[in-house]
Image (cartoon, rainbow, N blue to C red):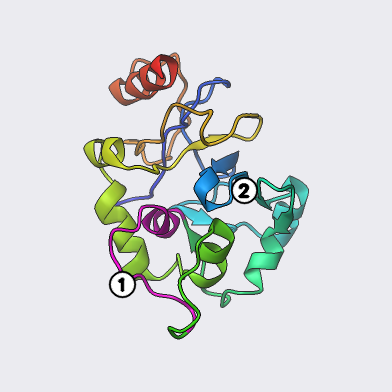
Amino acid sequence: MGSFSWTRAEHTTKRSNLTAGDKYKILVPKEFGGGYIKDIYYDYGYIFASDNDYNKNCNCGYYDANGSFYSANYFKGFAKSEDFYDLYGLLAWWNKKDKNLHLSYDDGFGEPMSTLGFLIFGKTFLQDNRCKGIDIGCYDEQIDRLKYPLKLVSASYKGTYEDCKGRSYGDPNQGFVKCYWTQNYDYILKALKNAEEN
C-alpha cells in the first residue's frame, strides 16, 4: 500500500484531490465544535506534520466556531515528537461506534466531547484508534453510510461542515499525482456529482 489521500468534498477550485504540500481545510461538524482545521497536506492522513516554519506561513491550526484559534504548534505540545495527529483517528472519534478508543489519560475524567478534546486527549495517531477509523471509513460504501464523513476542502472554501453537501472519498491515485475536475475519472465524477446534487 502507498499513501492515503482523498478527493475534495467541494469543487470551488480546479483541483479534485489532495497531494503533499496542498493547503486545505478539514471541516469540523457543529456537534464537535464546528469551524475547521487548516493544514498543509503531508501524507498518509497526518495532521500538523509539516515542519513548524511551514505551518506558521499557512496559519495552520484549529479555528473553532466561536472564533478561537489553536495553532499547530499548540497541538504539538501535547504529542510526542514521533506522534502525528491523524485524519482516520479523528474520523473514529466523530463516528464513535467503538467504546474502546484510547485516551491519553486514565478513566475518571470522562471522554472528550469536542474536536479540540479529541486532538489533545484522543490519541488520534495511535494505530489502534487510527485502524478503527479505517475500518469504518476506507471504502466509498462505508463513507456513504457515515453520519460524520471527512469533508476535506480547498483552503479558500468559506462554508461550514453543514453547508458542504459533498464528502471526501479515497483517492485511487493515493495523492501521487494532482488530479482535476475536468479529468474523466469515475471517482472524481462521483464526488463532483455528489457535491452538486446535495
- Quadrant holding the C terminus: top left
Tell me: 83 left or right of 36: left
Q: With respect to residue 118, does 11 lie above or below? A: above
Residue name at image x 43 percent, y 40 percent: 175
For the question of whether residue 22 can be seen, the reply is no
Query: Element type at marker 1?
Result: loop
For the question of whether residue 159 can be seen, the reply is yes
Residue bearing mark 1: 100
Seen from the viewer's position, the closer of residues 117 and 119 is 117
Q: How many marks?
A: 2
Residue 6 forms part of the magenta stretch: no
Residue bearing mark 2: 39
Query: Element type at marker 2?
Result: strand
Seen from the viewer's position, the closer of residues 54 and 133 is 133
Q: CA distance from mark 1 to mark 2?
A: 28 Å
Q: With respect to residue 180, does 114 lie above or below? A: below
- Please give the range of residues in magenta: 87-105
Tell me: 87 left or right of 159: left
Q: Residue furthest left?
A: 141
